[in-house]
Every structure is written in C-alpha cells, then in structure tokens.
Amino acid sequence: MLKILQHVKSFQTTYGGVERMVEELVPGLNRYPDLAVDVLCQGPKMRDYALPNRGRVFQVKTDLAVSTACLSWQDFRYWQHIAARYDIIHVHAPWPQSNLNLLLKRSYGAVVVHWHSDVVRQRVLYPFYKPLERWLLQRADKICVTSPKLLEQSATLDGFRYKAVAIPIGIKEAEYAIGEEEIRGARACYAGRFIIFTLGRLVPYKGFEYLVRAAALLAPRGLILIAGDGPLRPKLETLIRENQVEEKVKILGRVTNRELELYMRACDVFCLPSTEKSEAFGIVQIEAMRAGRPLVSTRIQGSGVDWVNQHGVTGFTVEPCKPTVLAGALNQLMAKPQIVHQFGTNARRRYERIFTAKKMAEQVRTMYLSLSSVAADTTRTTTASSKG
C-alpha cells in the first residue's frame, strides 16, 4: 500500500478552488485499497481527526498570513515528525509553506507538485519567492497541472514540462436533489426573465464590473444574478446605480451550497467574466456543466478557463474586459433557445466525460503508481541511512 501525504493550505475550513479540489480528491483516493492518503493543513486551531473511511487530517494553527500565503511554525514541526512515514508527498502550489518545509526537512519519498496557477498579482513579493518556486519544481518527481492549456502556456513551467501531466479537476455529482417544482418556483420569482447566473468572490480579477457594464447592453428581459461577497461589493453596487441597471443586476450575497445548486439549475446560462490568469481553471464552470447549463466565459492567456468551456460546443468564450463583446454573446444565447439547449446538453456530456471526481481520482492514482518505484528506492535509502 502506498502512503501519501497531501499538504494544502486548508481542508474543510475554507472554500478556495485549491481546497475544494483536495476535498473532492482525498475521499476518492482513499476508496482504493492500495492507497492511504492523509492531509496536513492549516486552520484556525489545532485539530487531529480521522476521515470517514480512511485517512487522517493533521490541522495546525496558522501563525501568519502574508498576502494570500498562510505560514505556520507548527506546520513545519508536524512535517518534521510525520513526513518520513509517507511514500509520496503531494504538495499544492504556489504556496511558500510547502517550499520551506521541503527545503528545511528533506522528504525521502517521491514528491508531486500540483501546479494550480502561476503567480500573478504578487509583484513585490514574487521576486523573493521565485528561487524557492524554481527549487520546488526541480525537486518534484512529477508535476500535476489542472489543464492541458495551463501546462502548455505556463511560463513558470518552462523547462519542467517533461515531467508534467495534465489532470483536470473533477467534482462529484450534486449533493442536493433539486426537484423540478422547486426549480419552477425559483424561476417564478423572476417571471419571464432570461437568468444569467454568476458566482465568485467579489474581487477585481473576477471581472464582475465588466458584467455589470454589459448589463446596459443586454436585451430587456436579461437578468444577471451575482452570488458572492467580497471587498468589491460597494464599488459594484455604485456601478449598478451609475449605469442605471438596477432592474438587470442583483447581488445576492453569499449563498448556501444548496442555494447554489438551485440557482445553477434555475438559470438559463452561467457566466464567468474573469480577467486574469489567477482564474486558472474555474471550478464553478464544471458545477454549471454538471447542472447542464451553457457557459459564457473569457479567453485568458495562460489560463485553462476556455479549455474547460469549449467555444461553440458548451458555450461561448470571449475576450476579457470587453462589456460589448460579453453582452453580445449573452444576447445571442437569449435570442436562440435552441443553442442554449444544445450547449447545455453538450456541457453535461463534457462533465461526465472529463470532470467527475472519480475520473480525477483514477488519473491521480495512476500517477502515484507510476512513482511507486521512486518511493520504494527512497524508502530503501532511508532505511539504510537509519541503520548506518
């Protein structure tokens, strides 16, 4: 049996894309009898608990948050005590804590680096982090990337693609059963409107300001529902008033997981107007595809967003930061219900073919098994060293 340690910023305490992916992946991997997967993470307090089927979570308290990087001395201390138990260490990057842990305490097992995104916004701090980043990618026995497009276009992965593999993120089927009567009830609240749903933290790179500006150019029955909260909310509310689109744009605030699934099922189209490659994949897109909804998203250099949403197949992809073009794509769908239906059907099929949690776990397991000889060699080295 291969023993694996997943090292991630948080687990079951926050809702970021990386954390969501790991929460989908770990239970799927632990269903295989030849794998045993534990998690080392950070959170608001120290915890050590068992997962329902197999595996443990070692949660340590975060000591310091620098920009979006959480750092913890206890994280390193735990790493010192437990890392040698594992055949494979699977870290999620970019995150300086994993770099530091591996640098300060060598892991004798194989190392997998799961590359989620190039560093985009940290222009001041990134030059200090970059040498650690390069060292980590050199140290990795395998690099796992979330989409073929990110693998191809990531500048950071230049020189390392020979040991990289693209494994798309997957999610399980919807947790909540939403009946047709409930969907009709939700749609009745917006009787006759063409519902454009979007979801995300209200921060600049999500591009919601461009969606608000696009609202002024939408056909009269178009209605944009924005779920989420964040620091940009006051600015967006002001923008809605200035553009006089109060009847076309509603900010819902935070929604529960069940409400999210209801909106996904009740909407006509899902829109992801992100503007930067910080949006490297867009898990929310596959939630919409799971619900059989067409997509309108953006084409971003170095991001896999427009690989997930296939232009002309599951929806439309448009240039970012272009309200006129964004409105044009939405108006086209509004005018052609037959395309909406076909794109939605294609989206559901694409989810089933590529983006399920089971398929993700199968591919990660295959990657782990390909490293079993590396893990065995390092285990023998460790044993020999301890005897010496």
Image: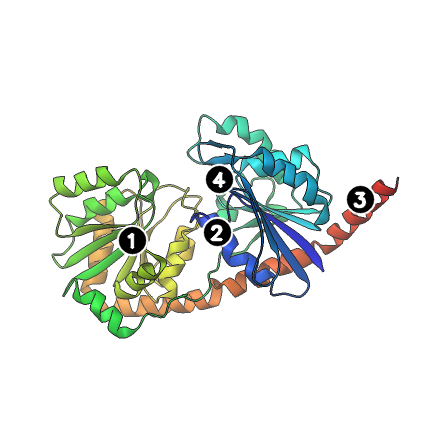
Q: Would you call the spot at circle 4 few (<14 residues within 10 Å), some (14-19), or many (20 or more)?
A: some
**333 vs 120, nearest the viewer:** 120
Quote the CA–CA distance across marks 3 and 4.
33 Å
Q: Is residue 185 left or right of residue 138?
A: left
**Residue drawn at x 44%, y 28% as measured from the top left:** 123
Upstream in the sequence, badge 3 or badge 4?
4
Q: Would you call the spot at circle 1 few (<14 residues within 10 Å), some (14-19), or many (20 or more)?
A: many
Residue 91 screen position, x and y as percent: 59, 45
Q: Is residue 160 left or right of residue 215?
A: right
Q: Secondary structure at mark 1?
A: strand
Q: Amino acid at mark 3?
A: Thr
Upstream in the sequence, badge 1 or badge 3?
1
Q: Secondary structure at mark 2?
A: loop
Residue 198's label in the rendered image is: 1
Work out which quarter of the rendered image holds the N terminus and state it. Answer: bottom right
Q: Which residue is the site of mark 3?
A: 382
Quote the CA–CA distance across marks 4 and 1.
24 Å
Quote the CA–CA distance across marks 1 and 2.
23 Å
Work out which quarter of the rendered image holds the C terminus and state it. Answer: top right
> Mark 3 or 4, which is nearer the eye?
3
> Mark 4 or 1, which is nearer the eye?
1
Q: Amino acid at mark 4?
A: Asp
**42 vs 21, nearest the viewer:** 42
**Residue drawn at x 43%, y 67% as measured from the top left:** 173
Upstream in the sequence, badge 2 or badge 3?
2
Q: Amino acid at mark 2?
A: Gln
Q: Which residue is the site of mark 4?
A: 118
Tell how many labels. Answer: 4
Q: Is residue 365 above or below residue 216?
A: below
Q: Which residue is the site of mark 2?
A: 12
Q: Amino acid at mark 1?
A: Thr
